[in-house]
Each structure stands twice: as C-alpha cells, then as structure tokens.
Image: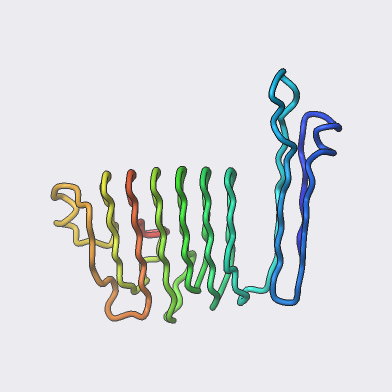
Amino acid sequence: KISAVKKAYGRDRLDKITINVAAQRDLVSIDTIYPPKPKFGLSDRSGTVDYVIVVPQTCTISRLELVNGEVRIDGMRESQVSANLVNGRLFDHNGFGNHQLFVANGGLDVAYEWWEPRQFSLDAKIVNGNIRVFIPGDGAFHLLAATVDGKIANDFSEQEDRQRAPVQKIDTLVGGPSQVTLEIHATNGNINVAEANP
C-alpha cells in the first residue's frame, strides 16, 4: 500500500509535481518528479511529497534511495534492507533482519525496543553526521564501531573504560556469544551506542 501527500504553497506548483509508480510482481518503483528550476526570476519552487509505504515485514527492500528528506523504516523482520540517503535523517526501528544503511550528510538513528536471540545484522555508515544506536540492556551482539574524526560513547563498555580517553574504534562482544553483528562507521561524526531504558 502506498499513500502520498503533496504539499506546496500554490496550486500551480502542486500540479507540476508528479508521482510515477510502476509495480510488478516482485518490484515497485516510485519516482517523484519536480519541475526544473527556472533560469531567471523568483518563481515558486516550493513542494514536498510525504510517502507512507506499507509492505510485508519479511519482504526485501533491495534499494531505497532519497536525496533530501527523512526516511523511517519500521518493523522489518527477517529481511534484507538497503537504504541510502544523501541529505537528511534516517531512522531504523525494530529491524531484525540484515540492514545496510547509509547517510552522506545528516543523522542516523537505529533503535530496538526489545531484543530477539536470532541471527540478524546491522551495517550503518555515515559520512558527515552522528550515529545513535539504542539497544536493550539484555542484548547480546558483536559490536564493531569506528570513527575517523569523532569519538565513540558506549554504554555497554566496562565502567572503568568509560573514564579513559575517548576511543575511535571498538571491537567487542557484548552479552556473551551471539549471532548478531552490529557494524557502525562514521567518517566525520560521533557514534553513540546507548542502552535503551537503562
């Protein structure tokens, strides 16, 4: 199910924003087409489109791409998800599948409200901005985190380790052996691995 809400300051501008949806048995393509910017003048260039796309929890999202805006992925289970955002914020909520998330500029938040002892993975990368990952205290996972120009805060590290100088790389097991791997990378930004509802 796909719903779209177009918003603009004027009716003329609203009518010029078009949405093309092509659906096949195993593929859905959605393109938002905005009118080109005028060469001269200060004509109305407003306009946004908000999408809500409802899919089965176990389907594959092989390519989700957005240039500017926000993306929220919610409740995808046992699935492959690949999402790329150029400018904005990306949210991944309760994703118990294999998720590859990339943001060029903005922010990236991943949150688990509960923990499931099953095999899944997270590969989260950001170039310019911060990554926050919220994990329940009973989580068990292999954490691989690194930042080039930033620091890492980890609520799951030993208390004495938190008092030391800021770290830029972590490779540790949390909560014992696990089939879960969380890989988190930032180029210019910080990483915060936080205990949810401590």
- Left or right position of 184 against 84: left
- Extreme-front residue of the structure: 39
Q: Quadrant of the C terminus?
A: bottom left
* Tag count: 0
**For residue 125, which quarter of the picture?**
bottom left
Residue shown at 58% from the left, 64% from the top: 63
Q: Position of residue 128 (x, y in %)?
A: 39, 43
Q: Nearer the viewer, residue 181 or 115?
A: 181
- Extreme-top residue of the structure: 41
Residue shown at 71% from the left, 29% from the top: 45
Residue 94 in the image: above or below residue 164: below
Residue shown at 25% from the left, 72% from the top: 173
Residue shown at 27% from the left, 45% from the top: 150
Q: Nearer the viewer, residue 117 or 31?
A: 31
Q: How is the image coloured?
A: rainbow
Q: Position of residue 26 (x, y in %)?
A: 70, 76
Q: Position of residue 126 (x, y in %)?
A: 40, 51
- Left or right position of 128 against 21: left
- Left or right position of 96 against 196: right
Q: Position of residue 75 (x, y in %)?
A: 58, 67
Q: Quadrant of the N terminus?
A: bottom right
